[in-house]
Amino acid sequence: MEKNRLFIIISAAVAILSSFLPWASLNAGNFGSYSWNGLRGDGWFVIIFAVVAIVLA
């Protein structure tokens, strides 16, 4: 496998994984805490584009 293709596959896999991890969190003391991950925002686009990159690689 070529180095470029391997780099694209690994980068896309990291992008998919990072969409499931928390991107930001807020602790409001007595009001509770809140966490924001990629799936609540534009993370679906990241996942779709990463899968397309893996398929095309």
Image (cartoon, rainbow, N blue to C red):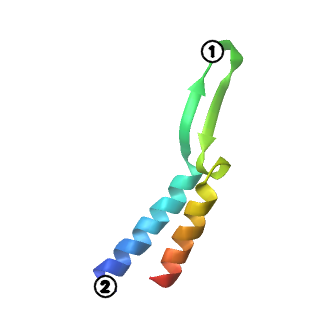
Residue drawn at the location 59% of the way across and 55% of the way down:
43
Q: Which amino acid does the dot numbered 1 rest on?
A: Gly
**Would you say 13 lies left or right of 26 here?**
left
Q: Where in the figure is residue 16, as x and y percent of width and height?
A: 53, 61
Give the percent coordinates (x, y) of residue 37. 60, 45
- Specify few, some or many for label 1: CA neighbours under 10 Å numbering under 14, 14-19, or 20 or more: few
Instruction: Point out the residue furthest to the top here.
Output: 30
Tell me the tag on residue 55: none
Residue at 46% across, 67% down: 12
- Quarter of the figure with the N terminus: bottom left
Going from N to C along the chain, the mark reached first, 2 or 1, is 2
Q: Which residue is mark 2?
A: 2
- Residue 48 against residue 1 in the figure, above or below: above
Q: In the drawing, does residue 46 fall left or right of residue 33?
A: left
Expressed as whole percent of the image width and height from the top left, the position of residue 40 reads 67, 48
Helix, strand or loop for disc 2: loop
Q: Residue furthest right?
A: 31
Quadrant holding the C terminus = bottom left
In the figure, residue 10 lies in which quadrant? bottom left
Q: Residue at 70% of width from left, 17% of height from top?
A: 31
For disc 1, the marked residue is: 29
Contact, CB < 8 Å: mark 2 with mark 1? no
User: Which residue ends up furthest to the bottom in the rendered image?
Assistant: 1
How busy is the neighbourhood of tag 2: few (under 14 within 10 Å), some, or many (20 plus)?
few
Identified at 32% across, 78% down, the residue is 4
Q: Which structural element holds mark 1?
A: helix
Residue type pointed to by label 2: Glu
Is residue 6 shown above or below 33? below
**Distance between the alpha carbons at the discs numbered 2 and 1:** 51 Å
